[in-house]
Amino acid sequence: MNYLYQTLEDRNNPEYIDANGPFKCRKKTSWLGDGYYFWDSFIELAHFWGKNSGYTNYVICHATADLNEELCYDLASNISHIKDMRNIVDRMVSEGYANKGTTVKRIIEFMKKIHCFTHYAVRILGTSSIAANDGNESFLQRFKFDEKLPAYLDLIPPIQVCIYDCTKVSLNSYQIIYPDIYTDDYLV
């Protein structure tokens, strides 16, 4: 099971969130298409998104999901899936459908169009998606391999999950965990 975190704008409606969550993103700028977006494993990333997304205040919900390789197209850690995507990109380039500016979203849409995308979620590592600036350094845990080189080990890797069908990946236990005032454990 994967532990997932969804960040939402706080609209002072915790009962609505509890009754209707998770919430689907349908923005044209979504990286992986329409779906339910989560951060995988690290709540720090959900806080990062809440603080940097333009929300005045934010809510974080926790859930679990079964993201095994049959259900989730894992481009963060499944070498077979990564090689498969490379083959699709090669095909798209040879057929004139892709170039260096082609987005991941476009590749996934192509895969769906040719019926070779049979998964219900995508898991990706958003390389360079979180800058190491003053606002983010409080939670980043990056360690260089060599002081003179930019390469580093990221101990809080920005892994995102986009779920297209929550029932197929057994999304469970969706509940608010931040801010404390919205949780069951909060004492007045």
Image (cartoon, rainbow, N blue to C red):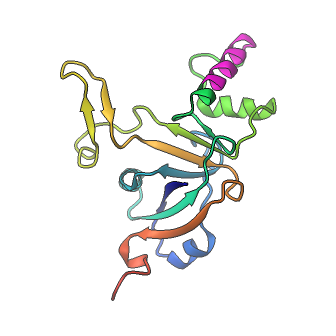
Residue 136 sits in quarter: top left
Q: Residue at x 62, y 60 (%)?
A: 171
Residue 181 in the figure: left or right of residue 114: left
Q: Residue at x 60, y 67 (%)?
A: 21
Q: Residue 52's x, y, as percent?
A: 37, 50
Q: Quadrant of the N terminus?
A: bottom right
- In the image, is residue 100 part of the stretch drawn in magenta? no
User: Residue farthest to the bottom?
Assistant: 188
User: Residue farthest to the top?
Assistant: 94
Q: Quadrant of the C terminus?
A: bottom left
Above/below status of 89 relative to 134: above
Above/below status of 107 relative to 50: above
Q: Residue at x 61, y 40 (%)?
A: 32
Identify the main secondary structure in magenta.
Answer: helix
Above/below status of 158 relative to 2: above
Residue 139 in the figure: left or right of residue 103: left
Q: Residue 41's x, y, as percent?
A: 44, 51
49 or 124, which lies in front? 124
61 or 26, which lies in front? 61
Q: Residue 137's x, y, as percent?
A: 24, 44
Q: Residue at x 24, y 19 (%)?
A: 149
- In the image, is residue 86 part of the stretch drawn in magenta? yes
Q: Residue 31's x, y, as percent?
A: 57, 39
- The span shown in magenta is 83-96
